[in-house]
Amino acid sequence: MKNYDAIIIGAGHNGLTNAAYLAKAGLEVLVVEKNDYIGGAAASREMHDGWVYSSCSYVCSLMRQTIHRDLNLTRHGLLLVPYLGSLCFGDKGEVLISYTDPEVEYNALRRHSPHDADAMFRFHTDLGRYAQLIRKTLLRTPPDPTSWRPRDIKELLWLAKEFWALGERELYEYIRFFTMSAADFLEDYFENDLIKASMASPGIIGTALGVQSPGSAYILLHHVMGDVDGNIGAWGLARGGMGAVSSAIAGALQEHGGEIRCNAGVKQILVENRQAVGVMLENGEELHAGIVVSNLDAKRTFTQCMDKNDLPEGIYEKAKNFKIRGSSGKVNIALSALPKFTGVPENHYINRGGQVFAGSLESMERAYDCWKHGRWSDDPFIESVIPSAWDPTVAPPGKHWMSNFVQYCPSKLANGPWTPEQRDQFGQSVIDKIERYSPGFKDLIVHMEVRTPFDIEAEIGLTEGNIFQGELTIDQLLFNRPFPGYAQYRMPIKNMYMCGSSTHPGGGVSSACGANAAREILMDLKRSNTVPEDDCYDE
Amino acid sequence: MNTDNNAKVPAADPFADERLKRTHFYPRAAQLNIRDAWSAWNGYKFADYYYDAEYEYFCVRNGCATYDICPMQKYFISGADAETMLNRMVSRDITKLNLNRVTYLCWCTDAGRMVDDGTVFRLGADKFMLTCGSPSLAWLRKSAFGFNKLSIIDMSDEIAALSFQGPTSCEVLKQMGLEGIDSLKPFNIIHFPFGDSGGNRDDKPLMVSRTGFTGDLGYELWIKPELALDLWDALYAAGENYGIQPFGEAATNMARLEAGFIMPGMEFNEALKTIHFQHDHSPFELGLGWLVDFKKPHFNGRKALLKERDARPEYTLVKLDIEGNKPAEESHLYSDKRCNHEIGYVTSAMWSPVVKANIALAMVKTKYLQGDIWAEIYYVKELRHYSKTVRCTLQDKPFWAPARTRATPPLAY
C-alpha cells in the first residue's frame, strides 16, 4: 500500500493550502475529506436549480495576496471582485449608506452627524495603525515566549520592535484595545447611535461575544484588517462563490502532484510509539504517512479523532476546554428579483451590495442576551450580501441570491436539541426581520436554506459551527493559539501538525494557517521552504 | 432623435468655441458620469471614469462594460486603388485581408519609425475603414500621392462607435436580438438590422466587429449618429441583468496593460510628433515585428526596417513581472541590484488586481535581455518618500489572456 509523505485531514481552504505547499516542495501528499465536495466552509454549491450558494463563508478579504500570486490561483480560476456599497439599518428604520468614494462618504456621514463624519478619520487612522501591526504577523509563526531558542528570541524581538514602533502612548492604547469591548472602543469616537452600531457590527461577527463584551474590539479589527489589492478593509467576492477559492487552491495542489480523496472521513489518527503514522478512515481503511496534518479544529482533532491514551497528559482537557462556541447561523435565500429597501434610493451601486441589519448597540446586546439563555435572537443581527448583483455566474440572469449571516444562534437550545421545526422557526425570524426593512421581500423567495450551528457542525465539522475554529480572544490568539506551547503548528504527538484556523492567525479565508504550518513542516523535514513571505502594503 | 449634441450649448456662451466637443453618446454618458471625471481625446470630452475606475475595470473582467470610442479616428478609403495604396502605406499585407475581416497593423515613415498603429476593416473589395488613435488625414493624403482612383473620407465625426467588452458581452448582444453573434470569430465583422430597419432585412445599419482593447471577450459596435442613443438604450436594457457599466480611460489603461497592448504616448511616441530622431520607435523595438511583412511588395519604411531586423533593435519592449506590490511607475531598470548599470526604463506599470501581480511594460536594451533586470521603484507613503530595488522577471505571454477571448462560440461566462 502507498505510503504518503503527508496526509492532510480536511479539504478546507487551509488544508488544501498546506497540501499545495508540501506538494510544491516535492512531498507526496494526500488530502482526505469527509464530504463529497471540497472546500469545507469555503464552498460553492448549487442548492437550487441555477442558484449557486456560498453556503458558509461568503466574502473574502483576508486571503493572503502573496499566496494567491505564488500559487497562481488566478490561472486556476480564482477572480476576486470587490463589491461596492453597504447599507446599515437602524432600529427605527433609519439607514446609513456607506460609499467607497471618500468625499461622498464624508457627505453621507455628515447627514447623520457632522461630528462623527470628522471623527471617522481618526477612527480609521487608529484602526489602520492596529491592523497594520497584526497584518504583519499573519504569515509568520508566533514565537514561543518561554523558549530560549534563537529563533523564538529573534521573533519575539521582532514583535517587540513592531510594538515599540507604535510609540509609547499608542502602545498603552493598543494593549487596552485587545481587552476592550467594541462598544467601549467606539464610545471614544462617535456620538451617533447608527454609526456606532454600524462600526460595531464587525465586532460580533462569528464570535460568541456581545458588543459590550471585553475582547470584541479585537474581533472588529480582525474583520476589517484585510484588504483587496491594497484597499485596506475592502471586501471581495470570489467569482463563482467561495468554492472558487478552494477549487483554485486544489488546482494548484494537483498541479504539483497532490491528491485529494473525497468521501473519506477520518475516524482516528493512528499513533504508534508516540508518533503519528497515519489515519484510519470511517470505513476502516488505514492510510499511512510520514506525517499527519489536521485541518480540523483543535477540539475535534483531539477529542474526537484521537485516542485519549495516545495524548500526553493535559492535552485532552485543554482541547475539551478550548473556547469554540457556536453563535451564528446562515440563511441562504434564492430570490426572483432584487429586493428593494425602504429609504434607499434606486442607486444600483449601493442598493445591491451589502446590508447590515444592525439596529443599535442596545438591540445587538439584546440579541446576545437571547443566546446566553440558549435561544436564538428574537430580533437578530443580520449581515447580508447579494453576490449575484456582482457576480453573473451564481444565479440565473435577473434572479438573485442573498447570503444572510445571523447572530445569535446557539448550537444547543436550552429547551432541547435542534429540530427541523425549530430550524424553520429560526429561519422565519430572519426573513421576518428583513421584511420589515424590505416590504414584499418574502414574496421574492424562491428557495431558502437555513443553517444553524448544529447543521454547520454536522456538515462541515466545525465544532459548534464556530466559523473561526475557536474564539479569537487574547487567551486564544498568537502564541496562545490553540494552546500555549503548541502555537507553532506542531502537536504533542511527533509527526503530527495542525494547519486549520484553530492555529495562528485564526479564522477567515486567509490561507495563512495552512501556509504557516507548511513552512514549519518543511523545516522539520529539512526541505527547502516553498512558502513565500507576506507582501504587505504597509512596508 | 439627437443629431447634434453641440447645438445644446447656449448661443450666448462666450466660451462656446473653447468647450470640448461632445460625442454621440454624450447625453447618456454624462448622466452616468456621476463623478464628473472627464478628460479629453481628439477634441472630444471624454470620460476618465464614471463612478470608480477600479470598479469599471472589474466590470470588464467580470461582467460587461461600454467604452465610448467616438473620438477614435475613422477613415473610409475606397476606390480601385484603395488596396494598393493601403498596402503601400502599412507594413502588413493587406491583400490577405478578407471581406468582413479586421486586422491590427501599423505604418511607418521612410526611416522605419512608427507613425501610428490601428485597425483596418475590409468592408468591400475596394472599401476599407482605417481606425487609429490620432488624426491621420494628412499622412493618408501624403501616402495616397500618385494614386488616382481613390477617395479618403474622414468619418471620425460621422460614425458612432461603442466598444463593448467583458465575459457577458456576447450574451447581452444575444439578448439584444443580434442573432448569430455567438458564431462571430475574433476579428470578424457582421451587420445587423437595427431600429427602423426592423422590417427591412436588407437594411443593416449596425456593424459589429469582434475587436477591442481589453484582452477580454469583446465587440465594437458601429452605427450612424442618428441611431447612437437608440443603440445605447437597447444595449443597456439588454445588459441590465449582466452587470453593464460604462468605463473610461482609466479602466481601459488597466485592461490594455494586462493584455500587453501598447498605448501611444506611453509605449511609443508617434514618429511625426517626435523631435529627437532617437525618441520615436520602430515596430521591432515595440515587439511588433509580426506586423512587418517583407514578402509583400514595397511599403513605407521597408528598407530601413529590413536593416533594423538584421541588426536587431537597440531597445525591445518587454513584459515584466516585478517583485512586491509597489507599481514600478517611471522606474529605471538596471542590470545589477546596486543600480550602477542602467539598461532601460518602464513605460507603463500597475498592480494587476485580477492576476495579483505587479506588472509593467518596459523598454530594455536588447543585449541585456538575457541577464538580471532590477527596477528601482520610488513610492510615497504619507508624504514620506521611499525607494526600493526589486527583481524583474520577463514574461512572454500577456498577463491576462482568458480562453474566452478567442473561443468561438465564446465560453460560458
Image (tube, helix red, strand yellow):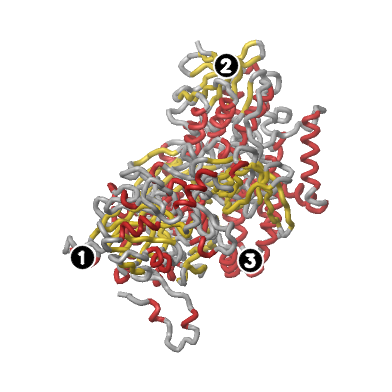
Q: What chain does mark 2 sit on?
A: A
Q: Residues within 10 Å of mark 1 (few under 14, many from 20)?
A: some
Q: How crowded is mark 3: few (under 14 residues within 10 Å), some or many (20 or more)?
A: many
Give the structural element (helix, strand or loop) at label 1.
Answer: helix
Which of the pair A422/B327 is nearer the observer?
A: B327
Q: What chain does mark 1 sit on?
A: B
Query: What's the residue type where badge 1 is placed?
Result: Ser
Q: Find out whether the residues at labels 3 and 2 contact each other: C-beta distance under 8 Å.
A: no
Q: Residues within 10 Å of mark 2 (few under 14, many from 20)?
A: many
At which x and y percent is residue A374? 55, 41
* Mark linked to residue A117: 3
Q: Distance between the residues labelled 1 and 3?
A: 55 Å
Q: Find out whether the residues at labels 1 and 3 contact each other: C-beta distance under 8 Å.
A: no
Q: Is residue A62 visible?
A: no
Q: How far apart are marks 3 and 2 (CA)?
A: 58 Å
Q: Distance between the residues labelled 1 and 2?
A: 72 Å
* Mark linked to residue A289: 2
Q: Residue at x 50, y 84 (%)?
A: B15
Q: Give the mark toward the camera: 3 or 2.
A: 2
* Mark linked to residue B197: 1
